[in-house]
């Protein structure tokens, strides 16, 4: 059985030695020692970065040699993350996975130190990102199993800081089991994990850390991944109850305030959009409470503004039922981003998917693999995707390869260049346009939340409207595209 060391529990002799050293060494000597270690790490990191820029394989050899000289140095091993990320950027997913796996092996080798559970979980998340890009999750499955086995005796019942990574590893294993057809066993695993977290948080030992872990796990289980299909609806309900209980119990916790606000936003904009009246009631119910929290929490202020925008959008958006079966409303184009210009009339005779999205929208980004797949699969049958977005005052960070809100005003031309860079980074080649400021196009197409898809047949009639990024939603859209194209093929 593994024995997990607690870095705060050391022998009396060692404590005495540490105290003695600390009392006899001048403070500036200790600082110099710390600085020396940090400086050495920075020097090694800079040298590795330079080698990666000139020859990535040589950089691998260089880091391997440094690790061989000091195999127990975590500072040396964590630099594998830089190597792996560079390989992933170059779409060399095999090498990226190999480097992440070597880093994981270091953490698993030191599984007797429970703090390494966090490093393992973070590394597995990176392996998961690579698996999603490569389409091969064999290494991910092995990594999850190895980590759960290595840390199976982690004292999470007495150290609630360990609840989160252990529970998230279990959730990932269950999601992978669903993907491989082991739905019943995966459901039992989730029921046991959620039940355990619920029991902990109903006990006298519960605290803010255990409650946060419970909520974050439920949010993961309520996400749009296909693997969550067997339990998503139940976990959404559990999450709704849990965040209310948490913010009542710990009203001053900024983290739990943020969880409460973000969950309300998801309930309003994504999970309960099929019931507009209930959504309006929720907005009216939670807005005063959020407004009180927002007085001292800037993150909640931002979420409250998003809810207000959504309220306005609901007020102006056409009911989805009034769109289906009717001619598609006109497009309102301020400018095209990645094509010179397209006349909407030129789309007659094609099946067109209008995708309303934004660069800041995580669920929108989650749909990108489907957009790429659908365009590749159906393009030669008369299918096209057209992206629709608006100006958000975003700018592109070329080094970080991401878009973010600009601190100063950017011009429409600059933001369109940002969108173009964003599209290129995500390998999206379908045409995209930006609507003018104050455009009513979103309301005309029934947009209450994004991503929002409107599927238009060859005659220009709206045939399907869906909002959200779930796998079941994607399956429904895919089937409808195929159906509409088949009608034209016959």
Image (cartoon, rainbow, N blue to C red):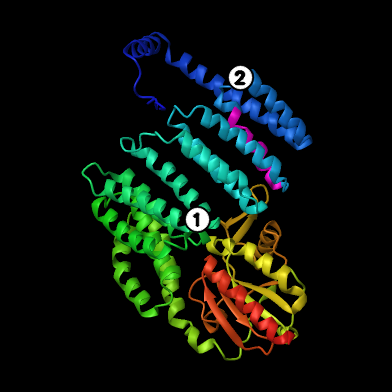
Residue 438: image quadrant is bottom right
Q: Is most of the magenta stretch helix, strand or loop?
A: helix
In the displayed structure, would residue 148 be above or below residue 335? above
Tag shown at residue 182 = 1
* The magenta stretch spans residue 234: no
Q: Is residue 255 visible?
A: no
165 or 340, which lies in front? 165
In the displayed structure, would residue 361 be above or below residue 175? below
- Please provide percent x and percent y for residue 399: 67, 47
Of mark 2 and mark 1, the one earlier in the sequence is 2
2 or 445, which lies in front? 2
Give the SS element for disc 2: loop
Between the C-alphas of marks 2 and 1, the distance is 42 Å
In the displayed structure, would residue 63 be above or below residue 133? above
Quadrant (top left, top right, bottom left, bottom right) of the N terminus: top left
Q: Specify the farthest residue to the left.
A: 204
- Please provide percent x and percent y for residue 480: 61, 79
Tag shown at residue 14 = none
Q: Residues within 10 Å of mark 1 (few under 14, many from 20)?
A: few
Q: Is residue 249 visible?
A: yes
Task: Write down the region rendered in magenta.
Answer: 77-89
- Please provide percent x and percent y for residue 103: 59, 33
Quadrant (top left, top right, bottom left, bottom right) of the C terminus: bottom right
Q: Nearer the viewer, mark 2 or mark 1?
A: 1
Residue 281: image quadrant is bottom left
Tag shown at residue 70 = 2
Q: At 38% across and 42% down in the image, what residue appears?
A: 163
Left or right of 96 in this view: 245:
left
Q: At 41% across and 75% down in the image, what residue appears?
A: 311
Give the SS element for disc 1: loop
Q: How many numbered discs sit on the rendered protein?
A: 2
């Amino acid at each position: 059985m593994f024995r997990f060391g607690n870095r705060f529990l050391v022998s009396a002799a060692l404590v005495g030695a540490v105290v003695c050293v600390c009392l006899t060494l001048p403070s500036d000597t200790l600082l110099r020692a710390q600085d020396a270690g940090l400086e050495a790490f920075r020097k090694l990191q800079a040298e590795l970065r330079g080698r990666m820029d000139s020859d990535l394989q040589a950089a691998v050899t260089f880091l391997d040699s440094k690790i061989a000289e000091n195999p127990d140095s975590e500072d040396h091993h964590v630099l594998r993350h830089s190597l792996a990320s560079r390989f992933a950027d170059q779409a060399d997913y095999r090498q990226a996975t190999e480097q992440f796996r070597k880093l994981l092996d270091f953490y698993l080798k030191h599984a007797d130190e429970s703090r390494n559970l966090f490093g393992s979980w973070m590394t597995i998340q990176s392996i998961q990102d690579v698996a999603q890009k490569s389409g091969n999750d064999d290494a991910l499955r092995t990594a999850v199993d190895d980590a759960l086995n290595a840390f199976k005796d982690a004292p999470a019942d007495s150290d609630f800081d360990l609840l989160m990574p252990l529970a998230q590893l279990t959730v990932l294993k269950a999601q992978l089991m669903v993907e491989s057809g082991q739905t019943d066993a995966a459901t039992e695993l989730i029921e046991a994990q959620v039940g355990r977290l619920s029991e902990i948080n109903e006990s006298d030992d519960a605290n803010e850390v255990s409650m946060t872990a419970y909520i974050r796990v439920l949010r993961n289980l309520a996400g749009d991944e296909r693997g969550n299909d067997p339990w998503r609806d139940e976990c959404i309900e559990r999450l709704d109850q849990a965040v209310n209980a948490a913010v009542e119990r710990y009203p001053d916790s900024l983290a739990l305030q943020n969880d409460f606000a973000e969950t309300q936003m998801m309930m309003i904009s994504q999970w309960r959009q099929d019931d507009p009246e209930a959504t309006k009631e929720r907005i009216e119910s939670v807005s005063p409470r959020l407004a009180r929290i927002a007085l001292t929490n800037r993150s909640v202020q931002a979420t409250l503004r998003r809810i207000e925008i959504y309220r306005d959008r609901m007020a102006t958006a056409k009911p989805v039922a009034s769109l289906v079966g009717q001619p598609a409303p006109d497009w309102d184009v301020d400018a095209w981003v990645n094509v010179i210009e397209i006349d909407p009339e030129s789309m007659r005779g094609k099946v067109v998917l209008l995708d309303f999205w934004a660069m800041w929208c995580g669920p929108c980004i989650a749909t990108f693999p489907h957009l790429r797949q659908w365009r590749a699969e159906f393009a030669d049958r008369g299918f096209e995707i057209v992206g629709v977005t608006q100006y958000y005052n975003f700018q592109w960070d070329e080094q970080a390869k991401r878009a973010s809100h600009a601190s100063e005003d950017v011009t429409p031309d600059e933001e369109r260049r940002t969108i173009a860079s964003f599209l290129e980074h995500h390998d999206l080649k379908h045409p995209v346009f930006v609507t003018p400021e104050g455009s009513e196009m979103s309301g005309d197409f029934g947009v209450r939340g994004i991503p929002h898809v409107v599927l238009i047949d060859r005659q220009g009639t709206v045939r399907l409207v869906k909002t959200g990024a779930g796998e079941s939603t994607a399956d429904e859209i895919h089937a409808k595209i195929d159906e509409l194209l088949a009608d034209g093929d016959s």
